Image: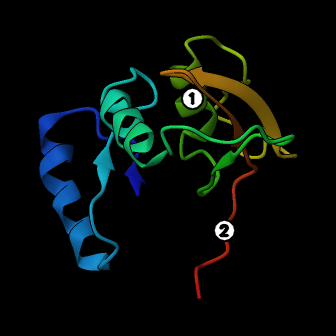
Amino acid sequence: MAVNKVDNAKRAEDAVEFYSLGLGEYFTLSSINGSGTGELLDALVEVLPEHEEEEDELPRFAVVGRPNAGKSSFINALIGEDRYIVTDIAGTTRDSIDVKYNRFGFDFNIVDTAGSEEKPR
């Protein structure tokens, strides 16, 4: 689990509440300045297999969350370029959009999704 908008020490302290969700380890990050993204990427690389057989389709990782939660900013920070439009206007991303990404020799797609107000069941 990744917790976005943790861009100062106070917010990092407040993020401890996410343990109460019972989802295990979480990663705090700030999409706007990229802090914390390295730790998240390191953890992702650890769980990827060392050697995969050649597949036609790359693995896909979807970035999901509420509108204006920083999903597009997060992906821009990961890929190191302003690929996705970032505005204060909710609903800027309307369709899921893939971008091919390579890190530590692994290729995969990161999917930017439209914000969702639906509550988990």
Query: Mark 1 — residue?
Result: 73
Task: Name the residue rendered at 34%, 73% in the picture.
Answer: 23
| Mark 1 and mark 2: Cα distance apart in space | 19 Å
Comparing labels 1 and 2, the label whose residue is closer to the camera: 1
Please state if 10 lies on the left or on the right of 31 as rendered.
left
Please state if 51 lies on the left or on the right of 83 as rendered.
left
Query: Mark 2 — residue?
Result: 117
- Where does residue 99 sit, x and y in percent of width and height? 75, 28
- Where does residue 102 sit, x and y in percent of width and height? 61, 22
Q: Amino acid at mark 2?
A: Glu
Q: Toward the viewer: 89 or 86? A: 86
- Where does residue 57 sit, x and y in percent of width and height? 83, 42
Q: Amino acid at mark 1?
A: Ser
Which SS class for mark 2?
loop
Instruction: For label 2, count other residues whose C-alpha is less than 10 Å away and answer few (under 14), some (14-19) or many (20+).
Output: few
* In this view, 112 is above or below 31: below
Task: Name the residue rendered at 72%, 24% in the picture.
Answer: 84
- Number of numbered tags placed on the structure image: 2
Q: Toward the viewer: 106 or 77? A: 106
Instruction: For label 1, count other residues whose C-alpha is less than 10 Å away and answer few (under 14), some (14-19) or many (20+).
Output: many
Q: Toward the viewer: 117 or 57? A: 57
Task: Name the residue rendered at 13%, 43% in the picture.
Answer: 10
Q: Quadrant of the N terminus?
A: bottom left
Task: Name the residue rendered at 17%, 61% in the picture.
Answer: 16
* In this view, 24 is above or below 101: below
* In this view, 34 is above or below 57: above
Numbered badge on residue 101 = none
Q: Quadrant of the C terminus?
A: bottom right
Q: Looking at the image, is mark 1 or mark 2 earlier in the sequence? A: 1
